[in-house]
Image (tube, rainbow, N blue to C red):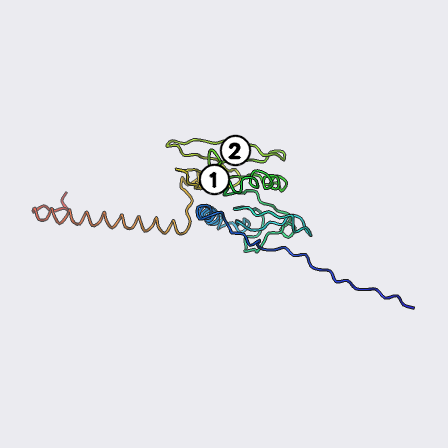
Amino acid sequence: MTASVEYIPVTPIEYPDEDGKPMAEGDIQFSYLAYAINALRIYFQNHPDVYVAGNLFIYYEKNYPESVVAPDVFVVFRVENRDRRSYKTWEENNQTPAFVLEITSKTTRSKDQGAKKGIYAFLGVREYFQYDPTGDYLNPQLQGLQLVDGNYFPVATNILPGGTVSLSSEVLGLELRLEAGKLRFYNPATGQILLTHEEEAAARQAAEEARQQTEQKAQRLAAKLRELNIDPDSL
């Protein structure tokens, strides 16, 4: 008599791409989240082994989908720069984010200061920055932590002329600055603030308008001089 063996199908483990919750607490938080992601993507656009993303699920233990965290903004080095629906560390040669930025608020305070902070230390996130755009509870509104021997210690805060708050990110080679309460990334190598494509386009348009106004003013002045029988080219 042959014994029969019942086949029990194995249900694939699912790793959801979203949880149905909004990307940010509100318009202010979303605007800075979008700025940080876009500005950093432009900064690293010529580095095919640097991945910049935000509000994306990071799964850090295979077969345990509950082991997940979703940073507002993060940067991973030594992985392919391509689109992903979620980030699974075991599919990425176990590379984890080196930099994380949370756009924090009083509503997310307990997670950002507690559970997430512990997970980031566990994952070896070398730098963890928090920015509170509405000033709900962080003072100063921009703060950074650096991982040393498994524990986080504050990144030194510098106050620049004019009251601008500046914190250096060794991981990114950039500074995070707080100008009149607004977060901006600053490149010390070029002496320029990182802009999004939209901001760059707006800056070019403003420069062109200023050039045209200067040219029109010069033309009006030249015409006035000619009325006075003065050759403007001789001046």
Is residue 101 in sight in this rendering? Answer: no
Determine the residue positioned at 39% across, 32% down.
Answer: 163
Disc 1 marks a residue whose amino acid type is: Asp
Q: Quadrant of residue 192?
A: top left
In percent of the image, x 58 and y 45: which residue is there? 97
Q: Residue at x 41, y 51 (%)?
A: 197
Which residue is under mark 1? 132
Q: Quadrant of residue 126?
A: top right
The furthest residue to the bottom: 1
Disc sitting over residue 155 in the figure: 2
Residue 95 in the image: state x and y as whole percent: 61, 47
**Amino acid at circle 2:** Val
Query: Residue 63, image x and y in percent?
Result: 69, 52
Badge 1 element: loop
- Foreground mark, 2 or 1, reads 1
Question: In this view of the protein, which residue sits in the foreground, 207 or 132?
Answer: 132
Q: Secondary structure under badge 2?
A: loop
Pick whichever, 100 or 77, lies toward us. Answer: 100
Task: Locate residue 74 relative to residue 201 in the image: left or right.
Answer: right
Q: How many marks?
A: 2
